Image: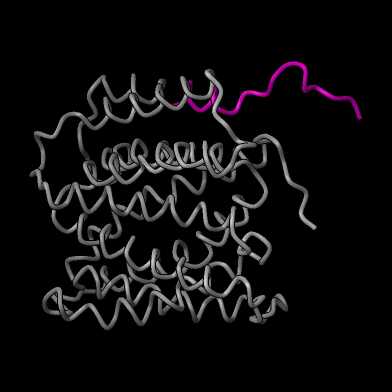
Amino acid sequence: MMERKSHIDTFGAVALILFALNLAFNQVVIKVTSGGFSPVFAAGIRSAGAVVVLLLWMYLRGVSLRMPRNALPWAVLSGVLFALEFICLFTALDLTTVSRSSVIFYSMPLWLALASQVLLPEERLTRRKSAGLALAMAGVVIALSDRSGGHVSWTGDLLALFAALCWGGIALLVRVTPLAEVPPEQQLISQVAVSAPLLLILAPLFGPLLREVMPIHIAGMAFQIIAVASLGFLAWFWLMKRYPANSVASFSFLSPVASVLMGWVLLGERIAPSIWVALVMVAVGITLINRRPREKVMSV
């Protein structure tokens, strides 16, 4: 059985930083891909493609598809939440800027921390962790406060918020229900397998399925299927089983800030001094959330 860690170690920190950077880049990719595919249709293709990749992965690694009966209802529920999450997120990114969608979507740790007070008593927030969470969130708000370069959409904002709530709900399901006892591969394939038909059936209700499809849109879809919806989320579920939920979720604050930095590197966008201040605040906030108490030091 996998050893459960009480804190984020060096390996976990590196893995979570890489995952956050992957998600940050994915926000840009989703925005670009929407030029060729309608948002909900793109989300459906992504889930369907992830099913294929995960089936191959599970076959090569000898992971069974058979899930305990008591986990099946929760698996279906997680798949429905997954579909709702990406209907909302893909549509939000189609309506508003990456910056606005990111800062709202990555507020997920706040909702997860709030729910954890009731459902995960072993992970209650201390004053230090609460201060770190607030500091990191404040850093993200500062980083993305300048909206002069893009349009504002209340619909997009609300959809991004609902997507964050669905993401937090999935994180709780894989911790407090029988899904916690199944392998990450089974957790994820249940979500993409349930969400794929739902998204593809609903897609025509959101307008034409195809726009002006170009090679860059197809490449973006391939990236989302392989690097995010299958292997990326698989890594996230594995990390959720190994480390405390609040600590894992806290690293998502890096993603919106990284999105701004990628805009500078990839798109030549100017970064204001406030962005650098925000990066320091996020780093300090995550340090406070994950710092080990001195009395926990052990010899081996």
Q: Which residues are magenta?
A: 282-300
Residue 248 in magenta? no
137 sits left or right of 75 in the view: left
* Residue 281, percent from left and from top: 40, 21
Residue under the point 51% across and 52% down: 172
Residue under the point 44% across and 41% down: 252
Q: Quadrant of residue 210?
A: bottom left
78 sits left or right of 266 in the view: right
Relative depth, front residue between 137 and 68: 68
* Residue 161, percent from left and from top: 27, 47
3 sits left or right of 125 in the view: right
Q: Quadrant of the N terminus?
A: bottom right
Q: Is residue 283 above or below residue 81?
A: above
Main secondary structure found in the magenta portion:
helix
Q: Quadrant of the C terminus?
A: top right
Residue under the point 22% across and 68% down: 39
* Residue 250, percent from left and from top: 48, 36
